[in-house]
Image: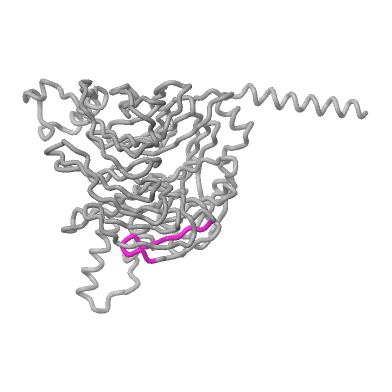
Amino acid sequence: MIRRSLFAAALSFFAAALIITTLPGTLATAAHSGAIIPQTTAARHGLVRPWFAQVQLDRGRGRLTDVLLYRGTIYAQTNKAIVQAIDAESGETIWVKRIGRPDHPSLTPGVARDMLAVVNGARLYVVNRHNGNLLYETAVKGAPGAGPALSDKRVYVPMLRGLMVAYRLESLTDPQKELGFGKSWEEMDEGERVAAEKERRDNLRLRQEFIAPLVSQSLGRVMIQPLVTLQNDDEEYCVWPTDRGLLNIGHINRHDEKKLEARHQIATDAGIAARPTYKAADPDALGDEGIIYAASRDGFVHAIEEKSGNSLWRFSTGEPICEPAVVIADRVYVATRLGGMYCLDARVGKEMWQAPGVSQFVSASKRRVYTSDKAGRLVVLDAKTGARLDTLATESLPIKMINSQTDRIYLASDRGLIQCLHEIELPQPLDHVQWEKEQKGAAEKAENVNEKDPLGDDDNPFNDPFEM
């Protein structure tokens, strides 16, 4: 009897193993790890899982290292130099390329309007972000300290010995269009514009002639990925911290591109361990400046005006900060190393609320803020008060992408399983930039109504973009 029971148990085990091994690659991996969040579980938390995807990697040695979002596309990079572009709403793969050598380390990619840049070993690669085609490649002199940053016209590579090197990326234009043949953009109808834009994206080219890069020396080692902030027809800015606690604001005059000038060097009392973040200037407000937010190891959050370098405010959390400050609308979210997240007013640095036991910002919708705790669980907070609303078990998905662009939640395992979650009532992504514009317009409209009516409601929900 005992032998029969043991035989039946063994048979059941081997049958289950056979089922798992015969599943498609993505499902087999997910079934083995138990990492896919079931739809029923997501629904109990007010969420839906529209898709999951498996990054192409060697399951024996490959690991997912970087996941980033840019304009509706997720770029996933592995430790074997594989980069995979995935549609952020459908989960469909757009392209997969090996960028560099698999036996050389790849640093976190940089991405801009049309290009994606990767430093692999001692070489810099720039590819078309729409299809992965190689556009530019060059050797990097020295030891890179972090991943690159891109503007529309150049790629910035930080070096360990304190150099910031800016390589010029000059686009080639169609000779016929350059000579004025064909319709102008204004003369095209909608269908022609879509076709022209697709053709432009598919046929991007860069000049291959050597152009001496611009170089700026800073004090200390550069080990944090730089950030390109303002760029227009006249100028562009790049921000990078050093391990000496200096925040450098570099400037290039686009009418006289002869030097990368470190226009401001702002000293903090401790090193900056995370990439700075940026809130662009309001184009409708005369004289408004973009604001750079940097968090330092001594627990301070610094808000610095981009052009003047003046300190707008600073806020002390009292605990070390190693995560980037995240700015959405008029709020800044800062998570501390010991476990606690502060929500600050982005304009004046005033504390709005503090949530204990939180170690990372993940994403935000109008009413909820999604975070992670030290155990790896997804913690849901009330956007207005910071009160804890819910907890979702996501320990098997240690990679939680910081998403300041939309409300979507992107979770991943180091084995390459990526999945998306969002609130059931938000089938379309909430674009935070567009949402901020809409909230600003609504707030101005409400303010004008109250000016005309002295009995206007002081509790107008438009006073706070997160209060709905």
Q: Position of residue 249 (x, y in %)?
A: 27, 47
**In which image quadrant can residue 269 be found?**
bottom left
Q: Is residue 348 magenta?
A: yes
Give the color scheme: rainbow, by chain, secondary structure or one colour.
Answer: one colour
Residue 79 sits above or below residue 346 on the image: above
From this viewpoint, which residue is outermost toward the left? 180
Between 75 and 390, the one nearer to me in the picture: 75
Is any atom of residue 468 visible in this view?
no
Q: Is residue 287 left or right of residue 157?
A: left
Is any atom of residue 243 visible in this view?
yes
Q: Is residue 239 left or right of residue 245?
A: left
Q: Is residue 183 magenta?
A: no
Between 139 and 56, the one nearer to me in the picture: 139
**In which image quadrant can residue 26 be found?**
top right
Q: Is residue 142 left or right of residue 22?
A: left
Quarter the C terminus occupies = bottom left
Q: State the residue at coordinates (18%, 28%).
A: 192
Which residues fall within the magenta stretch?
A: 339-350
Quarter the N terminus occupies = top right
Q: Position of residue 303 (x, y in %)?
A: 32, 57
Residue 36 sits above or below residue 328 on the image: above
Between 339 and 392, the one nearer to me in the picture: 339
From this viewpoint, which residue is outermost toward the bottom? 455
Residue 348 sits above or below residue 234 on the image: below
Q: State the residue at coordinates (48%, 39%).
A: 50
**Number of residue marks:** 0
**In which image quadrant can residue 81 be found?**
top left
Q: Is residue 400 left or right of residue 244?
A: right
From this viewpoint, which residue is outermost toward the right? 1
Q: Position of residue 20 (x, y in %)?
A: 65, 26
Q: State the residue at coordinates (21%, 28%).
A: 212
Q: Position of residue 373 (x, y in %)?
A: 55, 52
